[in-house]
Image (cartoon, rainbow, N blue to C red):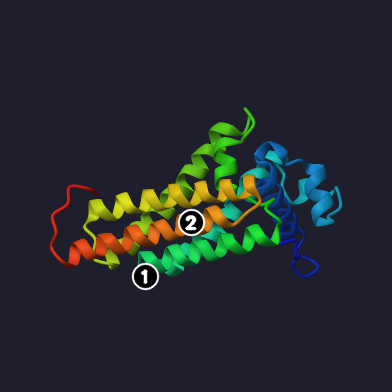
Amino acid sequence: MTNTRTKRGSTRTNMLIGAAEVLRERGAAGVTIDEVLQRSGAPRGSVYYHFPDGRNQIVFEALQFAGDSITELIDEAATKGGPHLVQRFVEFWDRILAESDFTAGCPVVAAAIGSSEDDAPHLTTVAGAIFGHWRDALTRAFLVDGCEESEAASLAITCIAALEGAVVLCRATHSLDPLRQVHSQLEFLLKSREFIRRNGIPTTAG
């Protein structure tokens, strides 16, 4: 997510964008009201006007807001098959990582593993639900490609784990190489399994 703000008057949206940026960079524990106000330019009085439950509500809605942008991309690409969806996901993170100078990671991963003790149970549940939606969309994409249900579900989990891990490695190394290498290996895996299916070669994997 970039620092671009919406039109004047969208104070609540701007606050969510600011909170989502911090969530991507520092995890849920790093999302403070002061940081959100600084990034959004919103007045302090707007916090409890727009978010009556305070910081906890901001963090929860910022996770949903940030996750939705990725979910929308995945849902749109799912009808075109697994390889296309993986390609779109890689393009998305290639851009986000480069534009943020490797400071922005996946908000869902950040919420799942980097929450404070107060945030953790609730945010982990939400993060799990978002990952579940992505898994289901990827499974549908691989079904479009002709995979069996069990194979499609297994490939979906493999792709999510590999790509999310690649994003973490990219941030740690300040390089896009991990993402591109993982993409290359996933392409090989998907093409290999397609070859096996088309030629009727037995396999116990999946």
Q: Label 1 amino acid?
A: Thr
Q: Which mark is residue 23?
A: none
Q: Is residue 72 visible to the viewer in this orientation of the structure?
A: no
Viewer-side residue, 88 vs 98: 98
SS label for mark 1: loop
Q: Where is residue 181 shown, x and y percent of the image?
A: 48, 56
- Marks 2 and 1, the one that precedes in the sequence: 1
Is residue 100 in sight in this rendering? Answer: yes
Tell me: 7 left or right of 89.
right
Nearer-the-camera pick, 168 or 149: 168
Task: Please tell me whether mark 2 sits on a helix, a strand or a loop.
Answer: helix
Residue marked by disc 1: 79
What residue is drawn where x is 73% and y is 52%?
50
Q: In the shown orientation, is residue 16 left or right of residue 157?
A: right
Q: Residue at x 48, y 49 (%)?
A: 130
Which residue is nearer to you in this view: 23 or 152?
A: 152
Location of residue 30 by image quarter: top right
Residue denoted by label 2? 181
Count numbered badges in the picture. Answer: 2
Q: Residue furthest top?
A: 117
Q: Amino acid at mark 2?
A: Gln
The crowd level at tag 1 (other Cα within 10 Å; few <14, some 14-19, many 20+) is some
Residue at position x 56%, y 36% in the image: 113
